[in-house]
Amino acid sequence: MKKQQIKVATANGRNRRQFLKTSGLAIAASGLLVACFDDKELYGNDGPFDLGGGDLGVLNYAYALEQLEAEFYTKVLNGSYWSGAAEMEKTLLQDLYNHEINHREFFKTAITANFDADEVLPMLEFDFSSVDFNDRDSVLSTAQLLEDTGVKAYNGAGKIIETGAYLVIAGKIVSVEARHAAAIRSIRGGDMDDFKLFAGDDAVDPATGLDGSENPSVILAAAGGFIVTEFTANKLP
Amino acid sequence: MSIIKLLEDFTTEKLTSESSSRRQMFGSLGSLGKRAALAAVPFGLAATTSKAKAATTASAMQTYPVSALQLALVLEYIEATFYAKALDSGILSGYPKAEAIYWQISKHETAHVNLLKGALGDAAFDAPTFDFTAGGNFDPFGEDGTNSALAYQQLLILAQAFEDTGVRAYKGQAMNLMNDPDLLTVALQIHSVEARHASEIRRLRGLKGWITGDDRGMGLPPIAQPVYIHEDNTTQGGVDVTTLGDGSPFSFESSTEAYDEPLTSDDAGAIVALFLM
């Protein structure tokens, strides 16, 4: 099995192998997990993966969010809502899937090319059990949440970026996330005869005309419900 | 030369009887007008001597944010004025969904104008006089006898052009704002709103909310192609993203849709110039 790079930690900071031993969980389960880990990595590490700071931190942060969205849309395209959806919605969601997968692979490639291997965020594990991928409203409302979150995340991360080229890349992506958000909202708004939902007052401040913007710590706390793999962002605001 | 100078020159040209037509002043359509280029570039590349270059570079380092905001203000003025006129024209009265969308967008653009004027302070300026016919290429308000159904189509076409331009122009100025984190953040927060607008206008017109290749989309005349120049780029951070994997996420279409491209100051200025009286 490929050496697992993620240093999974429990809430109290002990490594998972020790936790499994002392918690009395099934040998088979712990054995399976343990087989994936290199002992030296497991015991010699300093805790969970940290995204890093500055450019690296923002790129890993963006990569994490793109992984989240890519996995979400992958599940959408495997669900029965999508397979039975109206043509326009099928195409739209497939486009979103295409874009997020592209974004994810771009970040993986870019970070790998510009930083050390152990600085690259590994593949994360997600938990979408709260979403019913066979239910249209569950899918669309979650899509809206993820896209709006992406916009706020990128908008809040811009000021942390140190290298102009990375800011340009983040800029190229955030506007597409905003196009996504507007499109999902537009579909949902159409259902409710709310033709302003695409850029509704709940997303865009009516007094200033400004979209949301949040720091990484806020976004990660909010998105944490979907992310199983522990990681930290101690060097990001 | 700043964007303000460009606007002043327009006013002067209009008043002098010897002035050539606006189109002649800019040279051939579709190519970058020389004056627009000079005006839009914030660091005065018109200076040719090294002494002049040094002088302009020094002042340019401080004026990058100002030039960026001035370009943004012109674009917001175009949009705010356009949407107000559109709502006033009565053409949208038969189209309640479009009307609701235009009201929401109009509210944002007016707020953006006020925000940018506040940020610019003394470096702000009043709205120029706009020619939304772009020299007779459009009749969006039905003023020239165009029937209202056709005028409606042109209203949507122009809105699409303005919004897609706005997204790309703001993006092109991001690096000019890096030294001011708060200003950069505000610019990003406006930029994503323009993207929401663009997405919805495009979808109202029956297009996708995102740009495929450099396709300006059904109904947009060739004069609007500068809005989509370089949107067919697939190289991001030195990587050709079509090579990152197999399948639909890495097609030319997906790869170009997934990233919006910045517009340089020059190219944004050229589009603005089309709509200046």
Image: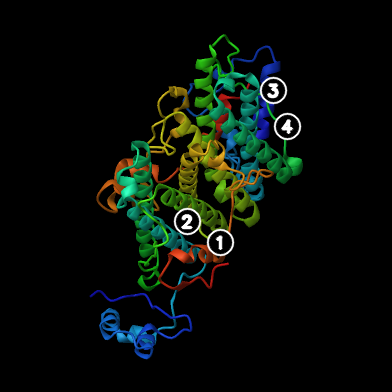
Specify the subunit that label 1 lies on.
Answer: A
Gap between marks 3 and 2, in whole Å? Answer: 40 Å
- The residue where tag 3 is placed is B11
Tell whether label 1 touches label 4 (CB within 8 Å). no
Secondary structure of residue under mark 1: helix
Q: Is residue A184 above or below residue B127?
A: below
Q: Residue furthest left?
A: A1
- Quick one: label 3, few (<14), some, or many (20+) residues within 10 Å? some
Specify the subunit that label 3 lies on.
Answer: B
Residue type beneath disc 4: Asp
Q: Which mark is residue A160?
A: 1
- The residue where tag 4 is placed is B126
Gap between marks 4 and 3, in whole Å? Answer: 13 Å
Locate the C terminus of chain B and report the quarter of the image it occupies: top right
User: Mark 2 vs mark 1: same chain?
Assistant: yes
Specify the subunit that label 2 lies on.
Answer: A
Secondary structure of residue under mark 3: helix
Secondary structure of residue under mark 4: loop
Residue type beneath disc 1: Ile
Gap between marks 4 and 2, in whole Å? Answer: 34 Å
Q: Which mark is residue B134?
A: none
Residue A183 point in image, percent of width and height: 46, 41
